Amino acid sequence: MNKPAKFVAILYDILEQDNFKTTIRWTKDGKGFYILRIPEFQSTIMEEFFNTQNFQSFLRQLSLYGFKMKKNEKNQKIYNHPLFFQGNYQELYKIQRRKKAKDIQEQYFDSVSPQISINNMRHQLEILRRQQQQLLMQMRIQFQIQFLIAKKINAMVDHFNENHTNEQRKQIYEKPMHLLFQLIFGHKPEFASNLMEPLYEDLIGQLSPFSEFPCSPIQFAKFL
């Protein structure tokens, strides 16, 4: 028994499966088929059986194998071929793909499909734009947090120098400074190390908060 072309055989098998009838099905007389849900057909059936979601490519294949399109009384697009009808699997091998470029006259059955692709691209671009805005907002917030912390540190240093001796600084500010180190280190370790460790040594002593405390914002919250 002669075997039909792979594309034609797969298409016929799809139409014979009951679980795809909500997406693609034979016409009532079995002499053609129509697609009920193009997006679902692209994302499920085409992806699984044809390794693509390009609906325009599917239409080109139909044209190359000699399928025609016409609209029925319900304005549905019906695709048919004289040899492609329900129950005629044994003659599908006669449906041959046109090979020479000069013999190919591609018929674009669906003028809406390019617009569908454009709309999908616009939707994806809009999602990317929103994600970019969210990332920029998060970066601004982090920068503001670090800026405010640096201002607080400068104010504390000025206050220390003006009002307290070294011994008083140790007694009054040792615990708050530990907590502040943990918070900054949890947000940005390199920033904290460069800025805070020399300051800590000057105000409190040689004890390094980075060796004594595993710093993170979560642990900082325990002290609140």
Image (cartoon, rainbow, N blue to C red):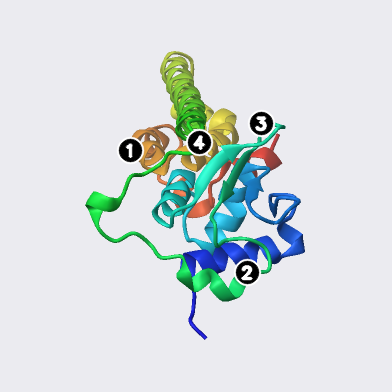
Distance of mark 4 from mark 3, alpha carbons? 13 Å
Is residue 131 or residue 160 the one in the foreground? 131
Residue 194, label in figure: 1
Q: Earlier in the sequence, mark 4 or mark 1?
A: 4
Residue carrying label 4: 110
Instruction: Say which quarter of the image contains residue 73.
Output: top right
Distance of mark 1 from mark 3, alpha carbons? 72 Å
Q: Mark 1 against mark 3, which lies toward the viewer?
A: 3
SS of the residue at dot 2? loop
Distance of mark 2 from mark 1, alpha carbons? 79 Å
Residue carrying label 3: 75
SS of the residue at dot 4? loop
Contact, CB < 8 Å: mark 2 with mark 3?
no
Residue 70: where, in percent of width, then height?
57, 39
The amino acid sitting under disc 2 is Asn
The amino acid sitting under disc 1 is Asn
Left or right of 40 in this view: 204 = left
Residue 130: where, in percent of width, then height?
51, 26
* Residue positioned most to the bottom: 1
Residue 115: where, in percent of width, then height?
48, 29
Residue 209: where, in percent of width, then height?
48, 46
Left or right of 95 in this view: 9 = right
Q: Mark 2 against mark 1, which lies toward the viewer?
A: 2
Task: Decide: few, some or many residues near mark 1? Use Cα within 10 Å; few <14, some 14-19, many ≥20.
Answer: few
Q: Mark 4 against mark 3, which lies toward the viewer?
A: 3
The amino acid sitting under disc 3 is Asn
Q: Mark 4 against mark 1, which lies toward the viewer?
A: 4
The residue at the point 43 percent across, 57 percent down is 65
Is residue 170 or residue 28 the one in the foreground? 28
SS of the residue at dot 1? helix
Residue 88, label in figure: 2
Q: Earlier in the sequence, mark 4 or mark 3?
A: 3
